[in-house]
Amino acid sequence: MANKTTTGILCFAGGTLAGAAIGLLYAPETGRETRSWLSYQLERYRSVLADLTDSLVTSREGAGQSSAKTEGQRVISDAKNKAEQLLGDVDQLISQINSRKGA
């Protein structure tokens, strides 16, 4: 159950980032307005991903050591690593946007 949920959340976050990037190509607003909006959205999704990784770590710490739980821990660990990678990508995008705001 957690595997499908985690995968769905990660797919949603990845799709959101891809959609935002494509949307920038067709944005009717000025660059400054678009960067401001994108910065806001990325900060919001970064917060959601950070909460997800925290909940994955918490649920992993409370698990026992049966084979099913061990497999679940592996899945959770993989999802956590992917979420952390997404957080890193979001941080890079925010840094790029903020550096362009100042320009």
Image (tube, rainbow, N blue to C red):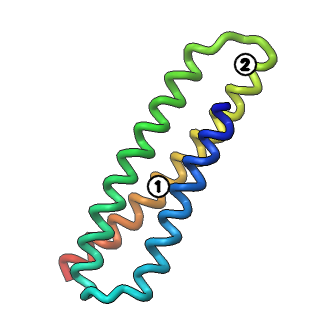
Write down the residue under mark 1: 88
**12 lies left or right of 4:** left
Question: To which quarter of the image does residue 91 belong?
Answer: bottom left
Write down the residue under mark 2: 69
Residue at position x 32%, y 89% from top? 28
Expressed as whole percent of the image width and height from the top left, the position of residue 22 reads 49, 79
Expressed as whole percent of the image width and height from the top left, the position of residue 93 reads 40, 67
Name the kind of residue labelled 1 in the image. Answer: Gly
Where the N terminus falls, by quadrant? top right
Vertical arrangement, residue 92 with respect to residue 55, above or below = below
**22 lies left or right of 65:** left
Crowd band around label 2 with a 10 angstrom C-alpha radius: few (<14), some (14–19), many (20+): few
Q: Which mark is residue 5?
A: none
Gap between marks 2 and 1, in whole Å?
Answer: 28 Å
Secondary structure at badge 2 equals helix
Q: Nearer the viewer, residue 44 or 87?
A: 44
Expressed as whole percent of the image width and height from the top left, the position of residue 74 reads 71, 31
